[in-house]
Image (spheres, rainbow, N blue to C red):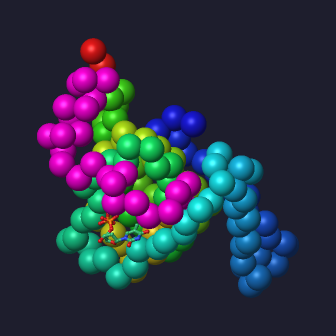
Amino acid sequence: MENGHLLRFRDIHDADWKNTGHLTPIEGMGEVPFAIQRVYYITGVSGEASRGYHAHKTLEQILICLHGSVRVRLQTAQFEKEYLLDDPFTGLYVGQMAWHEMYDFQNEAVLLVLASEHYDEADYIRDIQAFLKLLEEAGE
Ligand code: TYD
């Protein structure tokens, strides 16, 4: 799957959905293209704060805004783009070598992340200059 790909998840509901709501199932190797090894979520971020500022060497992740909204900036060797995640039926694929920044958290945003591996600090690239250098070297 390409970095920046937007996945659309199922919205299971009945005729009385305004009362009974929505159910969205996500299975590893099903709706998402990897076996889910880790789940984490980010809550309580103010509208002024931002997070991320790193890329991963191998990790694959899907970002889903379950409540509220958040903007995500992605930078890869191919593109630089901003996404608005504001519904629980959309997932943003962030795979290897995608610098990501999350900001403009609104309305008590809840950001769910599905990840392909357990946490490993050694998989992070936290220095933008080092990231850009790696992109440059890969492009040679
Ligand atoms: P980090 O991935 O840098 O968060 P963000 O990019 O949203 O700012 O993680 C923040 C801290 O949490 C860092 O000390 C590592 C720790 N952490 C874990 O222990 N396990 C995890 O699964 C994640 C994602 C982070």
In this view of the protein, which residue sits in the foreground, 51 or 59?
A: 59
| Residue segment shown in magenta | 114-138
Indicate the quadrant where residue 39 lies. bottom right
Instruction: Classify the position of the N terminus by image quarter.
Output: top right
6 is higher (above) or lower (below) than 118: above
Q: Nearer the viewer, residue 25 or 133?
A: 133
Residue at image location 40% in from the left, 60% down from the top: 120
The quadrant of the rendering that contains the C terminus is top left
Residue 70 against residue 93 in the figure, above or below:
below
- Note whether 81 is above or below 32 in the view shown: above
The percent position of residue 23, horizontal first and vertical second, equals 73, 71
Confirm whether the magenta stretch covers residue 15. no
Residue 73 appears in view:
no
Q: Residue at x 25, y 32 (%)?
A: 134
Q: Indicate the position of residue 94 as horizontal and vertical percent values.
A: 46, 47
Q: Is residue 134 magenta?
A: yes
The x, y position of residue 116, in whole percent, is 55, 54
